[in-house]
């Protein structure tokens, strides 16, 4: 059930120069949230900025909190990053479908700022977990230790080789022959496309969380459509309403 809550900032800090780690107290949203869902944050600066979608990184139902990790890229995220503990912010959520968690060996694949939603996914998955994370370079590498603390075997790749394997996550997966029973992924579209090919070649089902640009965020415009295969060929689906998670085999890349 989606609600708007006037939440309080429970804690806020920086993970890197431009990546903010914020926890919001929103018991109603936390109690309904699923791994892979997102929230819409309303910038409150007196101008009519659209809400900004941010994935739920972690859910703490005991304390009624959700954690968000976001990169400061523009007006909205800049405003959020300047909030202080105790400040209030309006939040709509939980939004979208989230991942469908299944039993078996899980492979979680994240790229850049697509990594945060995999934390809650990793926490909820039982059984063998392999995590593959890709970053531009060492200075952008976030949350690696947290996946290890959740009992996952963690592989890291970076474009420049300053941390882990030199190359992208799919090249790393090929070189380590990483396999499993289900892939859960979030990251740039190009990464998801190559990952989808890898999953198809090896017969592994793969869920991709697409972080397309959004406008209304509630299914009322067509600002976030992707092409999804159906019986008649293909159809448009809205990432904000029908996603953000899709079966990679259904996406027309
Ligand atoms: C379902 C979903 C979940 C997301 N989860 C996260 C998350 O957990 N952490 C996080 O850091 N970001 C996440 N994003 C991206 C985030 O929503 C945008 O970075 C944010 O809305 C930018 O707002 P802004 O006002 O700061 O920037 P703007 O001033 O609106 O834009 C600044 C720059 O960022 C670009 N931009 C805006 N939106 C996106 C986007 N979706 N993808 C790529 N570039 C974009 C703009 O084109 C522009 O170049 C998510 C997006 C979606 C759709
Ligand atoms: S952003 Fe308007 S329909 Fe998805």
Image (cartoon, grey):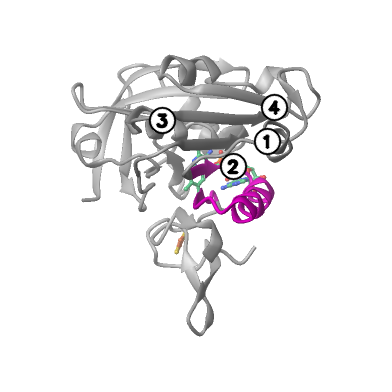
First in residue order: circle 2 vs circle 1 = 1
Q: Mark 1: which secondary structure?
A: helix
In the displayed structure image, the side of residue 206 where residue 33 appears, left or right: left
Magenta residues, start to end: 183-211
First in residue order: circle 1 vs circle 4 = 4
Gap between marks 1 and 3 measured at Cα: 18 Å
x and y percentages locating residue 158 in the rendered image: 73, 26
Please say if 116 is above or below 185. above
Q: Mark 2: which secondary structure?
A: loop
Between 160 and 179, the residue placed more toward the observer is: 179
The residue that appears at 49% across and 25% down in the rendered structure is 81
The residue that appears at 57% across and 34% down in the rendered structure is 113
Quadrant, the C terminus: bottom right
Give the mark toward the camera: 2 or 3. 3
Gap between marks 4 and 3 measured at Cα: 19 Å
Q: Is residue 187 magenta?
A: yes
Gap between marks 2 and 3 measured at Cα: 16 Å
The residue that appears at 70% across and 18% down in the rendered structure is 138
Does ligand 1 reach within 8 Å of label 4's beta carbon? no
- Residue corresponding to mark 1: 169
């Amino acid at each position: 059930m989606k609600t708007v809550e006037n939440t309080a900032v429970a804690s806020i800090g920086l993970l890197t120069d431009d990546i903010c780690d914020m926890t919001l107290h929103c018991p109603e949203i936390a109690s309904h949230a699923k791994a892979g869902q997102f929230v819409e944050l309303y910038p409150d600066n007196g101008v009519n900025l659209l809400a900004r979608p941010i994935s739920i990184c972690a859910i703490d139902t005991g304390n009624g909190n959700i954690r968000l990790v976001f990169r400061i890229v523009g007006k909205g995220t800049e405003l959020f990053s300047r909030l202080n503990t105790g400040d209030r912010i309006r939040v709509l959520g939980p939004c979208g479908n989230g991942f469908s968690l299944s039993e078996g060996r899980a492979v979680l694949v994240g790229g850049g700022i697509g990594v945060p939603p995999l934390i809650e996914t990793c926490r909820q998955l039982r059984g063998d977990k392999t995590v593959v994370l890709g970053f531009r370079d060492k200075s952008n590498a976030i949350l690696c230790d947290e996946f290890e603390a959740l009992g996952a075997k963690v592989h890291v790749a970076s474009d420049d080789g300053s941390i882990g394997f030199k190359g992208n996550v799919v090249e790393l997966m090929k070189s380590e022959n990483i396999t499993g029973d289900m892939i859960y992924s979030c990251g740039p579209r190009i990464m998801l496309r190559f990952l989808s090919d890898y999953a198809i070649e090896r017969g592994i089902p793969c869920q991709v969380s697409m972080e397309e640009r959004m406008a209304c965020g509630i299914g009322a415009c067509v600002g976030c459509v992707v092409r999804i295969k159906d019986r008649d060929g293909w159809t448009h689906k809205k990432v904000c309403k029908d996603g953000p998670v899709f079966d990679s085999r259904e996406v027309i890349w």
